[in-house]
Amino acid sequence: MVCQLGWALTESPHRVIDIKVNNIPQGPLRQHKHYIQFTVGEDTQETGKSDLSADPVWSEILSFNTSQSSNLICRVYKTPRRIDRALSRGNELIGVMEEEILLLLSGASFREIIQPLNKLSDPDLPLGNTTIQFSISTLEHNFPVLSPVLLMPADPMTQAILDISPALELAEDAHMKMQSGPQQTADALKIGVDIVSSDSFSTNYGLLVEHVQAFIGIADKLSEFHPYVKAAWGILSAIPKIERDGKITELVQDMQALYAFLKGTDPSKYDGPQKKIVMSLAQQTIECAYFIRQYASDPNFLKRAGKNLISDTDQKIQDFQVKFKKLRSAFNDHAVCDTQLVVLQIFNTVEKLVTDVDLKYMHYADNARFDSDKQCLPGTRVAVLDELMDWINSPDGENTPQVLLFSAAAGFGKSAIAHTIAQYFYNLGRLGSSYCFDRADQSKRSIKYLLSTISRDLSDLDPGWKSALCAVVTGDRSLCTTLAMKEQFDNFIVKPAAALTTVGPIVIVIDALDESGSYFERKPLLDMLIERAVELPKNFRILITTRPELDVTETFHLVHQCPYIKHKHVDAAEMKNQLSELDLSLYIKSKLSNISGLEARWPNGEWCSLLVKHSEGLFQWAAVTCHYIMDPYGGKLPYERLESSLDTRHGLDNLYHGVLNQAFQKDDFKVMNRYKSVIGRILTAKEPLPLSTLSKMHVNNPLWMDEIRAIIGPLGCLLSGINRNDIAIKPLHSSFRDYLTCHSRSGEFFISIYDAEKEFSVTTLHILRTELQFNICQLPTSYKANDDPEINLLQRVKDTVSSQLIYSCCFFAAHLLWVTSSSEIMKNLHFFLHNQFLYWLEVLSVTSKVNIANGILSSLLNWEKTDVNARLIIEDAMKFVTTFFQPIAHSAPHIYISALPMSPSTSLIAKMYCCHFTQVVSVTRGKQKSWPSISRIFQGHVGEVTSVAFSPDGKYIISGSCDRTVRLWDVQRGKLALDVFKGHKGVVKSVAFSSDGKYIISGSIDKTIRMWDAQTGKLVSDPFECKHAVFSVAFSSDGKYIVSGSRDKTIRIWATQTGKLVSDPFEGHTGSVTSVAFSPDGKYIVSGSDDMTIRMWDAQTGKLLISDPFEGHSHVTSVVFSPHGKNIISELNNDINQICENGSDVNGQFPPISII
């Protein structure tokens, strides 16, 4: 017998809205959340949980199909605040109200009701002065209100259609949170259906929402498209009232007819093409819902977007209609159909989109996008994902923040959530960009590349964005490569945003912000978000996931002051609640259900229950354990591995220790040394290396590949990339790295970063020594530029330059800086400088990395173990690169045929290498003897420049001027790195960098000292207020203190964190203090003054080290310590520098030693 599904009109549908309870009894210490259960006959419906309040309100709309003779029963419940009480006691019923609907309405079609709430023990006695308040009405039949009528007993398919209330309630509860209060509430269907007075439109819209609603229950059986159908219903049902408009009626009619058709199909019988079509249909419905919502709020929004439009309202509606008809036709024919979505965009016909401008010079982080393999398992994390999707799909406006920071502890599964959201909106064509930080790959996924990467991704999504971005960077290649956060935000985000054509949400996912680098590296981005989120487009939805690092949480404590940013934190107590046992159980079963032996040993799924309990809510624990149980290495059976997992103590550290303990014999010296060498390489690699590269990074160890495999083989549950040669090997989770590098946690499995870095530095220098050579790419001519297609340089690099050599050229210095002493390393460094420097530049040229050369050389120069001879060569090499940067970057052969012969005759590089290249042009007359004293002129100040200073890495120069500004210059570009630092009201007399290059200080005659962020140009704190004009400022080497010299003849020391004085002023000078400096160890301060003396002070006590000042000078304009702290150099007004020895003769006057 065939079961049929019929639909009948009900005669008396009723609606309850504007629900409120007044004067709920509260406990002595805290308030609670409440919800109300309404029952009419056999129909029971519940509101969501209220806010913490004694007078809670609810925005839900409840509809009942019943006669007026039925009773309405209201039960008010209180929810416990503690999870343990919720589990043990459940929710508490505090009061009831019961009345016949006929009496409540008293003959009217609408009444506002206020009734006393009665005690549970005696329903006739009021519960104090507590009342329940709501509005009840009889719905008018502007369109058919449908209710299911079973003509015969339901089969499973029919039951699936009817049994949709849990899914609907979840979606309804989430979307009702968008409403701001009782006055704005409306029935989820009534909101969509009560759009117009037209019977045709209202009927079709009501049927559309009903059919999508019913299809949710069917789609629930197939997880691929259920979330999309659910989201489409949520958006459609929450659209506010709009005026009657014939343009949109046909579109709604086509949509409802299609869903009415689908409602009668059986998804379990869909073939492959049909599943793809229904997926596309659901996604297209969401896109269409965005259009209807935008149209509802502003019917003329397309017309106001521009004067000349390719796509106006009618055309866009037609596009949607054509797409829906094609999808239905393809579904009926079981055909493969084009599933490209029709996305709502506005196009301008007059201004041609600039698509031929190449954006390749903008920094782009490769491999930083989301990974579809890292998504949540379907059916898990539903509550969290629904909440995030509700936020993303919320209408643009003041109540919808553009940025949501999602923080939780390690192991919660934040990244899985981020990857799921990214994949979901990528499928919708709504993902603007995704950027996943990785602590093991910070060099490629640098936070400095974040905004430029996002902007380039957005240019692929939105043609208007691309047009505006191209216009910004055209003709300014240096702007393309800027790393300044503020400059990137202004030019790569704010300016293109003005031309954005996409209507509806654009999603940007930033995962693992805590792995982006140090506090100092994150600070510019965090400050930018807090201060300038208001400038982001209203339809941006930026999801950021992070661990609750101190700097992140402190910054986002300010979000209550910023309506554009929301912070959602999941603490340890909530983790077990949020990550339910069901989620963990589903995940574990999906991984281990096919493993033989588990069910036999722990029947009825007990093996899964034990693992769920042992995980303590940590998704990462479950993931590592499942990988470990499935691991075929080590000779253990899966059930034995499961037993060992259960035998370990709880927590990630104990799990990691258990896995390592099973994999390696701790008492085998050779095995443990091998383990530390291999794992140390993996942890300290500046970018993750695949096995094909890592296996070549050794010093005369032909068995290195076998040793690596022996170590990483048993660690498939902890490391990724171990089974393929071309996939980077790195920890699966950053918590594993944290565990290994902390001795107190990992014990015998501890990895010494210093030892690993030293071993890596030896290896990289060895690779440079053995693989660098002249004309490494075998270029046939010097007449072609690197980018000339005839020479096919990319293929030549791939064929002739090994991956280990490229890595070594880029990162040998980064490893070297960790080493304190090694004769072998110094020997190899000298060999590199004397014999291979030019070959190294050649590799950087052919790989387009010349821009990193001076940074590497600068770090070598600052390495404490670099000897005098090496320093002289490095300094000369930096001048060589700076002077000839353009020809070297343009064509590798010009290193030898242009740069080398044109170098000054006194150049150490020229002296060392010219003898090896005798067949190139030589300068016989007019050749410079030394490097030009002026390599660049920086112009921009409109007043006299009073003070300048280099950044520690030599990449930037800071300047102060009589024009009352401070400016930061990019040395290589010769241009401003940031906008002008403004704020001083008088001449800026002194500027200085902190030793880490993160901060800049300036002193002015306006009686203030100001500290600036070197990456953003923003003030770090309020100005340090002084009583007199400030002539000189300097940082201590640790950055904790600032010393200043003033017109009032005193020296003062300030704490950088507080801006407060740390001691009384140092007094002794009889004239203005014109210059001050800290000794390198921070123990002493030297000062110069108009009184023609130099004095040296104890920085801690403020006492003079020598009672008599250093005299015999004219006006002293500048003083500074030598790098080793043994000498002081002073600049005099008569341009003579005098060096005083600061050695054992500290109790006597320093005699002048030499005049420069």
Image (cartoon, rainbow, N blue to C red):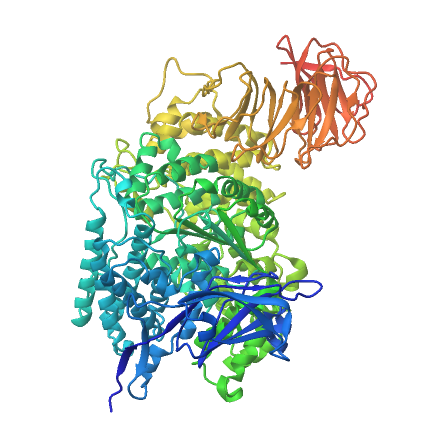
Q: Residue at x 43, y 61 (%)?
A: 175
Identify whether 87 is placed above or below 872. Answer: below
Q: Is residue 644 left or right of residue 476?
A: right
Does residue 114 lie above or below 741 as drawn? below
Q: Residue at x 33, y 23 (%)?
A: 921
Is residue 382 visible in the rendered structure shown here?
Answer: yes
Give the left or right position of residue 500, taking residue 488 as reference: left
Picture coordinates of residue 640, whole percent (x, y) = 55, 81
Image spot of residue 1140 (x, y percent): 71, 18
* Residue 892 in view here: no
- Give 1092 or 754, whichever is nearer the viewer: 1092
521 or 90, nearer to the observer: 90
Task: Name the residue at 25% across, 59% down.
Answer: 198
Which quadrant of the view contains residue 179? bottom left
Q: From the image, which quarter does the C terminus lie in?
A: top right
**Percent coordinates x, y for residue 740 in the rendering:** 60, 59
- Residue farthest to the bottom, as pictured: 1
Quadrant location of the N terminus? Answer: bottom left
Q: x, y percentage for residue 1003? A: 63, 23
Q: Is residue 430 left or right of residue 823?
A: left
